[in-house]
Image (spheres, helix red, strand yellow):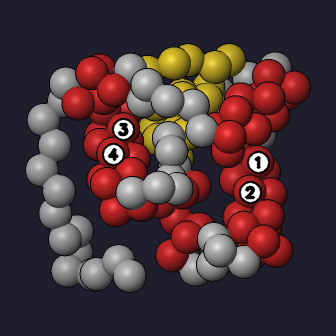
Amino acid sequence: MNPLVYIASPLSGDVEQNLDFARQACRYAISQGVTPFAPHLLYPQMLDDNDPAERQLGIDMGNQMLELCQELWLCGDRVSPGMEGERKTAEGLGISVRQISTQDVLSVEYSPTDGMGMEMR
């Protein structure tokens, strides 16, 4: 079974571009033979990141999933405050942390698709 890796990358700012980068980071992780989990690709689909209570709920659920992962990968050349929190949580849990450069993430061929015809909103 492939190691489970928690993928962290920036979300706020240019959200659409950052979501594309997170998907690319997951594709990179798959190419490295691991199973990626990126909570910021999942929870914002059902929780309002602009609502502090819902944002915290998403962070808490992500941290619960982080406990199951073998590694945390900080993807990109900028570590956001949210990513820094994930790093501190991982270190507190004794989970190894790797920095993955933007260049490495973008080195893997990636063609965004509509998946199974479902549209993200």
- Sequence-first disc among 2 and 4: 4
Whether residue 68 appears in this view of the structure is no
Q: Nearer the viewer, residue 10 or 112?
A: 10
Residue occupied by mark 2: 59
Note whether 108 is above or below 42 in the view shown. Answer: above
Q: Position of residue 17 (x, y in %)?
A: 31, 54
- Label 1 to label 2, Cα distance in Å? 6 Å
- What kind of element bears circle 2? helix
Q: The disc labelled 4 sits on which kind of residue?
A: Phe
Note whether 24 is above or below 96 in the view shown. Answer: below
- Label 2 to label 4, Cα distance in Å? 19 Å
Residue occupied by mark 4: 21
The residue positioned 78% from the left and 51% from the top of the image is 64
Residue occupied by mark 1: 63
Q: The disc labelled 2 sits on which kind of residue?
A: Ile
Note whether 103 is above or below 38 in the view shown. Answer: above
Question: In the visual, does 40 lie left or right of 101?
Answer: right
